[in-house]
Image (cartoon, coloured by chain):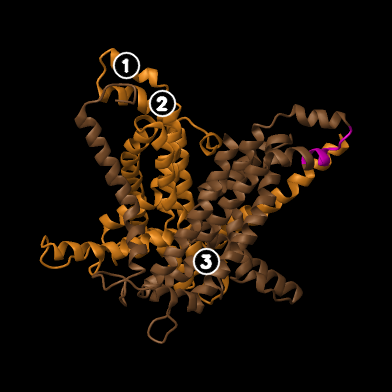
Chain colours: A orange, B brown
C-alpha cells in the first residue's frame, strides 16, 4: 500500500502543478482582472465597468455576435464539405488509395497556418496568381480584389479547420457496417433515405466532435480574420489583442477574454447536451 | 452507393470530380507558395520571370536569400529551441498524466480528468492572455515582497515554452493514454510477483510498451509547438518564433523570401510527419 501511494504522488505532483499553475490560476486571474478598474482618482477599485462597456458600446457586442455567427457558418460549411470527402475515403475509394488519400489530407495541416494563409493571399490578392491567370486568359478585363471580404475570410477559416472535421468523420464512417447500407439498398431505399436514416445517425459522435473542434478553432482564430478579412470584418480576438497590446487596457481585455471563454464553453456544452455526449468521449 | 454496390457512371464521375476539386483546394495555396519561391522576381506574384535560386542563396545587397537572412534564421532557431523544450516537458508530464488517469485511483479523479481536458476547449488566445496576466501578477508580487526582478515573468522565451506546454500536454496525455489502455496488466502482475517494485515495473515493462506512442506524441508536440501562433502571440518577448516573425513580414508587405521559408518549412514538417506516420504504421502492423 505504501508503495502505491508513492507512485500516486509521483504522477499526481507534476500533473497538479501543470493544471493549477498554468490553467486554473491564470484563468482565475483573468476573471479577477476583468472586475478591476480605476476610479476617477486613478486608484484601483472593483467594478463592473469593463462588462458595462461591452454592452453599451455597440461595436464590441456586434463584433462578438458576428464572430459567433460566422463561426457557426464556418462550422456548417466545413461539415457539408467534410461529409462527402470522409464518405469517399472511408467507403468509396479502393483500399489501396485510402491510405494515400488520408496521408494527402493530413499533410497540409502539419504546415504552419501562417504559410497556408499566406498561400491564399498570393493566390487571391489583386496582384495575385488567380487574377493574373484570369486577366491574361481574357476572362477578366482588369484584376479584382478577392481578398479582404467576409466570403474569403470564411473560406480561409473553413480551409484552416477542415482536417479537424474530416478525420473524426472518417473514423466514425469506417466503423459503419457496409452490410447495413447494402441491406437498405436491396430493400429499395434511396440514397437520401440511406444518408438520413443510416449514415448520419451512425456518424453523430464524429459530427459532434468535429463541429465542436472546428467551431472552437474558428472562434479563437486570430490569423485568418486578421490577414484575410477586410478593414470592416473585425474578429473578437482582434479586439482582445487591441485592448491588450495597443490600448494597454488589460482590465477591459480580460473582460473580453472571459466573455469569449464563456461563449465557447456555453456553445460546446450545448452541443454536447444536444447530442447527448460527454467531453471525455468526444476527446478520445 | 458504396464499394460493394453497383454505381451509376454519373455518380462515380461526379464524386471523383468533387474529390479532385477538394484536393486542388487543399493543395493550391501550398503549391503556389513553393513555385513562386523560385520566381526570378522581387514580388511573390506572377508573371513568371524565369527560374532563380536567389531567394535561397542570394547574399545581398539587392536580394537576401533565406540562408543569409539573419532575422529569419534566428526565428527558425528560436522555434527549434522552443519546440525542443516544449516536447520534452509535454512528454514528461503528459506520460505522468496518462499513468495517473489510467492506472491510479484517487478522490476527485473525474474532476481532475475534466480539468485536464479543459485546454482542448479554451481558445489559444485566451490561454495566452491569461498566462500573460498571471505571470505579470506573479512578477509584481515577487517584486513588491522580495524586491526581486525576474525576467521569467515578462514575455520571454520561457513564457512561450510554458504557454505552449500548458495545452500541448493534454494531447500527449490523450495519445499515451490510448496506448496505455491496450496494455495487458497481467504482465505487471507477473513482474510484481517476481519481486520487482512499482517503479521497476514501470521503467522496464510499461514504458517499453509505451515507447512508440511516446515518440509519436513527442513528434506531434514538436510540430504543434513549431507552428503555434495564437498562444505565442501574447507571450513572445524579444525573440520571435518563426510563425510570429513570418506574420510580421506578411502583414508589412512581403518578398519572396517568405516563400522560400515556407518551402523549407513545408519540406521539413512533411518529412517529420511522414517519418512519424511510417513508424506508427509499422507499430500497428
Q: Position of residue A15 (x, y in %)?
A: 69, 48
Q: Is residue A67 above or below residue A89?
A: below
Q: Name the residue under label 3.
A: B234
User: Which element is circle 3 on?
Assistant: helix
Q: Where is residue B141 in the image (x, y as percent from the top left)?
A: 69, 69
Q: Which residue is drawn at 40% across and 64% down?
A: A238
Task: Give the mark count.
Answer: 3
Q: Which region of the structure is painted magenta?
A: B195-202
Chain letter belonging to callout 1: A
Q: In the figure, is residue A70 to the left or right of A136? A: right
Chain letter belonging to callout 3: B
Q: Judge by depth and name the residue closer to the eye, A80 or B33.
A: B33
Q: Judge by depth and name the residue closer to the eye, B101 or B138.
A: B101
Label ID, residue A184: 1
Q: Position of residue A148 (x, y in %)?
A: 27, 64
The quarter of the picture where residue A185 lies is top left
Main secondary structure type of the part rendered in magenta: helix
Q: Judge by depth and name the residue closer to the eye, A107 or A215.
A: A107
How far, Cα to Cα, is label 3 from label 1?
54 Å
Name the quarter where the N terminus of chain A is drawn: top right
Q: Name the residue under label 2.
A: A202
How far, Cα to Cα, is label 3 from label 2?
41 Å
Amino acid at each position: 500500500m505504501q508503495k502505491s501511494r508513492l507512485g500516486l504522488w509521483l504522477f499526481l505532483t507534476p500533473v497538479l502543478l501543470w493544471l493549477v499553475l498554468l490553467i486554473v490560476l491564470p484563468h482565475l486571474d483573468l476573471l479577477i482582472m476583468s472586475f478591476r478598474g480605476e476610479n476617477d482618482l486613478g486608484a484601483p477599485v472593483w467594478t463592473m465597468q469593463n462588462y458595462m462597456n461591452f454592452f453599451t458600446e455597440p461595436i464590441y457586442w456586434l463584433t462578438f455576435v458576428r464572430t459567433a455567427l460566422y463561426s457557426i457558418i464556418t462550422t456548417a460549411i466545413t461539415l457539408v464539405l467534410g461529409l462527402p470527402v470522409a464518405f469517399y475515403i472511408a467507403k468509396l475509394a479502393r483500399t489501396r488509395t485510402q491510405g494515400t488519400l488520408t496521408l494527402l489530407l493530413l499533410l497540409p495541416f502539419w504546415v504552419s497556418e501562417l504559410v497556408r494563409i499566406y498561400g491564399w493571399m498570393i493566390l487571391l490578392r489583386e496582384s495575385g496568381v488567380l487574377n493574373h491567370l484570369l486577366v491574361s486568359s481574357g476572362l477578366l478585363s482588369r484584376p479584382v480584389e478577392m481578398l479582404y471580404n467576409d466570403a474569403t475570410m470564411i473560406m480561409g477559416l473553413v480551409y484552416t479547420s477542415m482536417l479537424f472535421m474530416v478525420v473524426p468523420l472518417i473514423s466514425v464512417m469506417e466503423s459503419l457496417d457496409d452490410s447495413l447500407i447494402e441491406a437498405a439498398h436491396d430493400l429499395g431505399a434511396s440514397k437520401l433515405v440511406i444518408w438520413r436514416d443510416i449514415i448520419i445517425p451512425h456518424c453523430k459522435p464524429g459530427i459532434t466532435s468535429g463541429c465542436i473542434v472546428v467551431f472552437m478553432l474558428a472562434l479563437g482564430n486570430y490569423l485568418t480574420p486578421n490577414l484575410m478579412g477586410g478593414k470592416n470584418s473585425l474578429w473578437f480576438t482582434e479586439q482582445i489583442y487591441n485592448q491588450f497590446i495597443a490600448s494597454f487596457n488589460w482590465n477591459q481585455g480580460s473582460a473580453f477574454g472571459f466573455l469569449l471563454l464563456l461563449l465557447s464553453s456555453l456553445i460546446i456544452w450545448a452541443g454536447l447536451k444536444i447530442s447527448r455526449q460527454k467531453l471525455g468521449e468526444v476527446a478520445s | 452507393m458504396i464499394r460493394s454496390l453497383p454505381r451509376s457512371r454519373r455518380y462515380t464521375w461526379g464524386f471523383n470530380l468533387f474529390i479532385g476539386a477538394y484536393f486542388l483546394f487543399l493543395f493550391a495555396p501550398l503549391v503556389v507558395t513553393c513555385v513562386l519561391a523560385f520566381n526570378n522576381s522581387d514580388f511573390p506574384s506572377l508573371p513568371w520571370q524565369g527560374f532563380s535560386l536567389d531567394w535561397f542563396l542570394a547574399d545581398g545587397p539587392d536580394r537576401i536569400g533565406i540562408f543569409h537572412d539573419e532575422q529569419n534564421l534566428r526565428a527558425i532557431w528560436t522555434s527549434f529551441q522552443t519546440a525542443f523544450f516544449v516536447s520534452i516537458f509535454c512528454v514528461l508530464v503528459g506520460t505522468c498524466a496518462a499513468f495517473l488517469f489510467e492506472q491510479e485511483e484517487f478522490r476527485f479523479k473525474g474532476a481532475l480528468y475534466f480539468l485536464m481536458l479543459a485546454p482542448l476547449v479554451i481558445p489559444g488566445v485566451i490561454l495566452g492572455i491569461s498566462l500573460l496576466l498571471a505571470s505579470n501578477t506573479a512578477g509584481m508580487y515577487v517584486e513588491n515582497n522580495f524586491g526581486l526582478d525576474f525576467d521569467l515573468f515578462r514575455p520571454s522565451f520561457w513564457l512561450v515554452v510554458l504557454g505552449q506546454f500548458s495545452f500541448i500536454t493534454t494531447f500527449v496525455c490523450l495519445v499515451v493514454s490510448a496506448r496505455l489502455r491496450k496494455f495487458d496488466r497481467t504482465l505487471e502482475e507477473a513482474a510484481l510477483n517476481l519481486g520487482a517494485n512499482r517503479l521497476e515495473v514501470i521503467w522496464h515493462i510499461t514504458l517499453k510498451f509505451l515507447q512508440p506512442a511516446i515518440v509519436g506524441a513527442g513528434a506531434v508536440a514538436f510540430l504543434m509547438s513549431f507552428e503555434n501562433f495564437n498562444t505565442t502571440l501574447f507571450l513572445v518577448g524579444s525573440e520571435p518564433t518563426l510563425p510570429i516573425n513570418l506574420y510580421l513580414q506578411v502583414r508589412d508587405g512581403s518578398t519572396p523570401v517568405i516563400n522560400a521559408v515556407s518551402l523549407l518549412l513545408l519540406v521539413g514538417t512533411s518529412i517529420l510527419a511522414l517519418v512519424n506516420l511510417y513508424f506508427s504504421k509499422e507499430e500497428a502492423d
